[in-house]
Amino acid sequence: MSWQSYVDNIMTPDASGVCPVRAAAICGFKQGCSVWASSGLNVTPEEIKALSGDSKIFAQCGPKIGGVKCRMLRDNKETDGMFSIDFKTSADAEGNTYSVCVGFTHTALIIAMGTKEASGGQISSKLYSIISYLRGAGM
């Protein structure tokens, strides 16, 4: 399976038939910071490096993800079975904010940015099976 097929899977409708994710990416951080696959999310190497580092700093100063300033809502990066951090974007020109979930494997970040209607739970549930599978495979 290619990395793009994982991103494509994240972008599919959930069990209710709704597509809660509007953009997604899988990025490597162990041997350099790079985007392995993406759909509508332009993540920079600097953003990947920040996200893969110490998450405690996000409580004071949230990161940029895809060029958009975010604030941290929940840090479950080290929580077994979750391995993720939930963020909310700052408001865009229309006043809309978006939920973002960043999942962590041993070597990669999986990032999903939701639609304006999507909840954080809808976004994170799209990532959990992929995170678990890749971590189990040693990725």
Image (cartoon, rainbow, N blue to C red):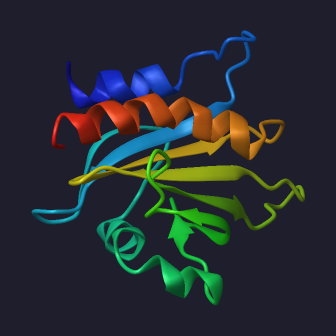
Query: Which residue occupies the extreme right position in the image?
Result: 95
Quadrant in the picture for residue 122? top right
Q: Is residue 30 above or below residue 20?
A: below
Depth check, front residue: 32 or 83: 83
In the picture, measured across the screen, residue 27 lies left or right of residue 25, that is: left
In-image side of 131 versus 58 (left or right): left
Taking the spot 49% from the left edge, 36% from the top edge, the residue there is 127
Image coords of residue 4 (percent x, y): 30, 27
Q: Nearer the viewer, residue 8 or 83?
A: 83
- Residue located 22% across and 64% down the image: 33
Residue drawn at the location 42% of the way across and 22% of the way down:
8
Task: Report how many numbered discs are placed on residues in the image.
Answer: 0
Residue at figure coordinates x 43%, y 64% from the top left: 78
Looking at this view, is 78 or 111 the one in front? 78
Q: Quadrant of residue 43?
A: bottom left
Q: Is residue 33 left or right of residue 6?
A: left
> In this picture, is 5 found above or below 62?
above
Percent from the top left, x then y, of residue 89?
71, 62
Give the camera-side residue of 101 and 134. Answer: 134
The image position of residue 120, as x and y in percent, is 72, 45
In the rendered structure, the answer to whether residue 110 lies left or right of residue 115 reads left
